[in-house]
Amino acid sequence: MGSYRSDPVHLEFWYRCVKCGYMYTPQQFQALAQLHASHTGEKEAELLEAPERVPCRNRGCTGHLTRTESEYKEAR
Ligand SMILES: [Zn+2]
């Protein structure tokens, strides 16, 4: 197991809400997972592996996220 980096997973794909279709960047997804973990006591690393357990942040939306096949290219 090569765990020399602190990053638990490679966040290189867009994430999308299954209900409202809102698109999240990997950074937004990570922030959302972190926030959700702090509320529920779940492990952030586990949520990052399971986007279906991370709820959409849009008000009134009861959807959850899913990883898309669209690669996220960081604008530098
Ligand atoms: Zn949504």
Image (cartoon, rainbow, N blue to C red):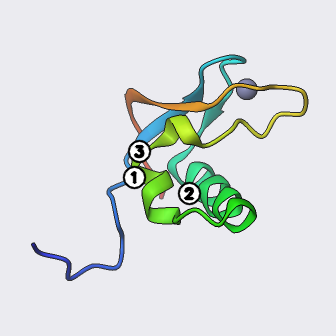
Q: Label 3 belongs to which residue?
A: 73
Q: Label 2 belongs to which residue?
A: 30
Quadrant location, ligand no. 1? top right
- Name the residue nearer the viewer: 56 or 46: 46
Q: Amino acid at mark 1?
A: Leu
- Name the residue nearer the viewer: 68 or 59: 59
In the picture as drawn, the residue positioned furthest to the left comes out as 1
Tell me the CA gap for discs 1 and 2.
8 Å
Task: Kindly tell me whether mark 1's CB lies below 8 Å from ligand 1.
Answer: no
Q: Residue at x 69, y 25 (%)?
A: 63
Q: Is residue 37 left or right of residue 67?
A: right
Q: Amino acid at mark 3?
A: Lys
Q: Position of residue 24 (x, y in %)?
A: 61, 39
Q: Position of residue 58 (x, y in %)?
A: 82, 34
Q: Is residue 61 above or below residue 7?
A: above
Mark 1 element type: loop
Q: Residue at x 68, y 38 (%)?
A: 55
Give the class, few, some or many, for how many residues have Cα within 10 Å of label 3's Cα (few <14, many ≥20): few
Q: Label 1 belongs to which residue?
A: 11
Give the class, few, some or many, for how many residues have Cα within 10 Å of label 1's Cα (few <14, many ≥20): some
- Mark sitting earlier along the chain (3/2): 2
Q: Is residue 37 above or below residue 21?
A: below
Q: Position of residue 34 (x, y in %)?
A: 62, 63
Q: Is residue 64 left or right of residue 75?
A: right
Q: Quadrant of residue 73?
A: top left
Task: Kindly tell me whether mark 2's CB lies below 8 Å from ligand 1.
Answer: no
Asked if the residue at tag 2 contacts the one at tag 1, i.e. Cβ–Cβ closer than 8 Å, the answer is yes
Mark 3 element type: loop
Q: Residue at x 33, y 59 (%)?
A: 9
Tell me the CA gap for discs 1 and 3.
10 Å
